[in-house]
Amino acid sequence: MRNVIVGNKKIIAIIVFILYSLFFILNSHSVSAGTFTNAKITISDSRAGQTGVQYDSAFTATVTTAIKQLTIQFCTASSGTCTTPTGMTTTGATRSSDNLAGSGRSDDFSTNGTLTTVVTTPSTQSTQAITATYTGITNPTTTNSSFYAVVTTYSDTGSTTIDTATVAFAILTSSSITVTANVGNTLSFTVSPVTSGSVNGATINVSATTATTVPFGTLSSGSPKIAAHDVTVTTNANYGYVVTAKSTNPPLTDGSNNIDVFTGTNTSPITWSSPNGSSASVNTGFFGYTTNDSTLGTGTADRFTSSGGNKWAGFDTTPYEVAYASSSVTNGETTRLGWQAEVNAIQPPGNYSGSIILVATPTY
């Protein structure tokens, strides 16, 4: 934690970076009809024991056999006997969506650690990307560990296998920043403080930043504070990775008062402008972010760095891209992220706090 002072009171700006590392394809098992490609499991939150987590499964079928049943089984190991991870609860899950061909659905989540969806009237399945999303899952409670999901499709109700693949996901502590998962396929994600220099053309003037905190110090009218972190990703994922950022909205609050998100967006970041609101907590303070990645994978690739750089966006509860690579980066790739806060004379004093969550996702 670090302290930020507005007026005569302390403002605590807590920036919690939670790696969100998922998407490992470890083994594609040979089956009678075909083998999944581009298989992955994405979880919405990587914190140990977190409840209400969303698990998005995605895989590409290589044959057109109609899928009668989809089963996802969670295990502590990638092969051998499947033991449900300690603390993981799936019995209260809900299937929120899927694009399996056919009509009618029934779900069976009665066995903890197993998600089963049956298509009442299946249809021939194109060799296309298939998705299924399940919500309301409780993460395993074992910290800083990798777990596995065996995804299997059947042409009947659980006897004749069509495709199968084993993928991995990592569970961290509630505040972990770095993780190295060595489970055949590899991912390393680290966050390091930057205490001088510049970020995307803007001068860094916060020198006490640590790996997990940003001490903005005294925020005063007309004096923006800029801090930065370097995020480094190393992975052998065939299709690279993406790092996203999201936050509570607004990210900095003190009771009913808040420092608003900056007016630029991730899709259309803009040059920083000072808050000019005339009513307390209504555009009287801004908090935003920038990235020096000029080759992002969505939208305009250089939207943060074009025309002199120094473009900024406001945070959202939806994760948005801040770093991207289209292929494996076994020697590591570093992206600099910047955080900026500024208030005007109308901003109420108080102890403000908030959080940022960084998620790194490799795709195999």
Image: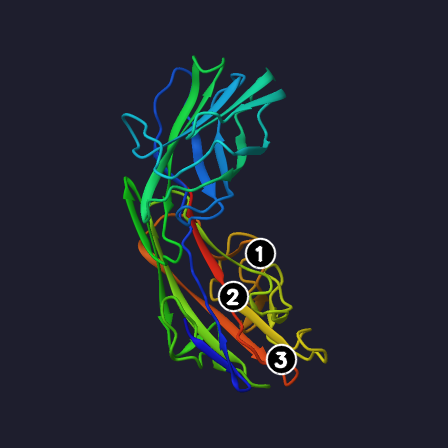
Q: Whole-Å distance between the Cαs marked 1 and 2?
A: 12 Å
Residue 87 image position (x, y, % from top left): 38, 39
Ranked by sequence position, the earlier of labels 1 and 2 is 1
Quadrant of the image containing the N terminus: bottom left
Q: Whole-Å distance between the Cαs marked 3 and 2?
A: 16 Å
Q: Mark 1 points at which residue?
A: 317
Q: Give the residue type at disc 2.
A: Gly
Ranked by sequence position, the earlier of labels 1 and 3 is 1
User: Is 47 displayed left or right of 273 in the figure?
Assistant: left
Q: Which residue is drawn at 42% across and 56% down?
A: 18
Label 2: few (<14), some (14–19) or many (≥20) C-alpha neighbours in 10 Å: some
Can residue 216 be seen by looking at this rendering? no
> Given this view, does label 1 or label 2 mark the residue nearer the observer?
2
Q: Tell which of 123 and 143 is nearer to you.
A: 143
Q: Which residue is drawn at 57% across and 19% down?
A: 119
How many numbered discs, if any? 3
Q: Name the residue under label 3.
A: 348
Q: Give the residue type at disc 1.
A: Thr
Residue 160 image position (x, y, % from top left): 43, 13
Q: Are marks 1 and 2 in contact (CB under 8 Å)?
A: no
Residue 321 image position (x, y, % from top left): 51, 55
Label 3: few (<14), some (14–19) or many (≥20) C-alpha neighbours in 10 Å: some
Can residue 363 be seen by looking at this rendering? yes
Say if 125 sits above or below 351 in the image.
above
Q: Whole-Å distance between the Cαs marked 1 and 3?
A: 24 Å
Q: In this view, which residue lies farthest toward the front? A: 255
